[in-house]
Amino acid sequence: MSDLQKSPLHDRHVALGAKMADFGGWEMPIEYPGGGVLKEHTAVREAVGVFDVSHLGKGVVRGPGALEFVNARLTNDLRRIGVGQAQYTLCCDRETGGVIDDLIAYVRSEDEVFLIPNAANTSAVVGLLAADAPDDIEVEDLHTRFAVIAVQGPRSPDLVAALGLPTDHDYMSFTRAASGSGGDLTVCRTGYTGELGYELLPAWEDAGAVWDELLAKGVALGVLPCGLGARDTLRTEMGYPLHGQDLSLEITPVQAKSGWAVGWDKPAFWGRDALVKERADGPARSLWGLESQDRGIPRSHMQVLKDDQVVGEVTSGTFSPTRRVGIGLALLNRGTAEGDVVTVDVRGRSSVMKVVKPPFVPSHVR
Amino acid sequence: MNPADLKYTAEHEWVRVVGDHLRVGITDYAQESLGDIVFVTLPVVGTEVTAGQSFGEVESTKSVSDLFAPLAGTITARNEALDANPELVNGDPYGEGWMVELAPAAGVAAALADVQLLDASAYEALTRS
């Protein structure tokens, strides 16, 4: 895996004995010994878990009117939030409205917007914005300038406070702060688990000190280092889409029911014409939740059938550690309704599943 | 460590002689690779299996793996505890996490003489390569 990029915490993961895997071109921890997906998942639902998600991209758009520049390109409406707040948004293809990436935009000022795209899509997003930017707006890829450490779970405020960091800002807002061990960092009330939580952005070279302090001070709170395996089961329980599976160039936000992250009243954003039309016509397929009624676990690309007709495909699926059943997300043809009973072809066997509206477990982000 | 008194297959299963039956499970390497096991699907007692036949599944949070019959025979017992506690496979793959017992038609000695199973050191070499 020598071609893969490495997080600033890589040596620490290896020292902990983590199982490592390629994640968007980065060698990242999937799970840790003594933990495992189920225990790590439970730590986040019931106590607190820390994740290294430094593979996530970072970029900044700065210059006069940077906010307006971004707002005329990404889907969500930055005018819905103020300075110091963050927003989930989408970068769509100009022609088709397909999703190039989903990302979080952090408004630092009218003239500066910070972005956290997915690892594998960072250069695409940064490149598209840079290519479209006027001379006085600069778009910079800061991928290896900052680490991202997610601290998630009901005890996360206690742990973040134990580092002397602010914790009482609102969901989807952020603030700069000085930490005892790691210099200045940004504390965001964001996450991808459905639990109350924070994402800390220390400078790349400060990440180790922050990570060590989180694990040391978290012992009394029941902290576990958590890998991307648990991150996937946690986000699937919330029905949060993962780019590359539930969102992609072939899957529009209208199909993925991500229309809430589109500023429909804005005069311009990439993909607007295609998306407005698809929304008016009604999408041919939509993203639904599937809840297994037996021991079948839906997995990506499995076929979904109703009355022996293929009506769609599973885009994400796993075992829900909280509900103890198979759950998944699936793109299902128009006409599918909540409560429908379908079958999923699980390696040649028919597993009975119910069509539901995610989340599969209640959200506790606030 | 893989117990020295067991035989192993290239499919990461172990075989233990228990009287006139063979007990079968998956190796520590297999459970470690799979991660947290959440469902184990086993054949019912009385099922006849042929060598190499897929007779069950072990599913973890992230993937699923077939169980293959290491040799031909009739299933004489299945580890019922795995229905409620599949994590036994992770915690004790060579003990409480066993999968099935089977009786070879020709008897244990004849059946073992007839198949190529690995000893612990050969199996370890396989998992290191």
Image (tube, coloured by chain):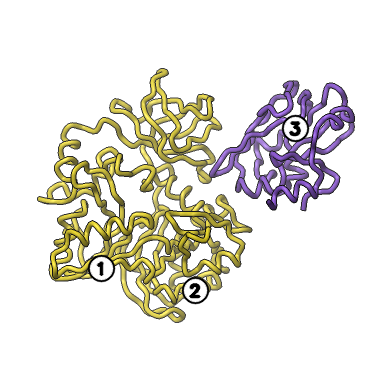
Chain colours: A yellow, B purple
Q: CA distance from mark 3 to mark 1?
A: 62 Å
Residue A5 position, x and y percent, is: 45, 62
Looking at numbered disc 2 in the image, what kind of residue is underneath it?
A: Gly
Front-lying residue, A248 or A308: A248
Which chain letter matches label 3?
B
Crowding at dot 3, Cα within 10 Å, few <14 / some 14-19 / many 20+, comes out as many
- For the C terminus of chain A, the quadrant is bottom left
Pointer 1: what residue?
A: A84
Looking at numbered disc 1 in the image, what kind of residue is underneath it?
A: Gly
Q: CA distance from mark 3 to mark 2?
A: 47 Å
- The residue most toward the left is A267
Residue A273 appears in the figure: yes
Front-lying residue, A327 or B6: B6
Horizontally, residue B53 falls left or right of residue B111, namely left
Horizontally, residue A348 falls left or right of residue A244, namely right
Residue A142 position, x and y percent, is: 33, 68
Residue A48 appears in the figure: no
Camera-nearest label, 2 or 1: 2
Disc 2 secondary structure class: helix
Camera-nearest label, 3 or 1: 3
Horizontally, residue B94 falls left or right of residue A315, namely right
The numbered disc on residue A208 is 2
Q: Is residue A227 above or below residue B99?
A: below
Front-lying residue, B129 or A365: B129
Crowding at dot 1, Cα within 10 Å, few <14 / some 14-19 / many 20+, comes out as some
First reached walking from the N terminus: tag 2 or tag 1: 1
- The structure residue drawn at horizontal position 70% and vertical position 24%, both measured from the top left corner, is B44
Looking at numbered disc 3 in the image, what kind of residue is underneath it?
A: Pro
Residue A208 position, x and y percent, is: 49, 73
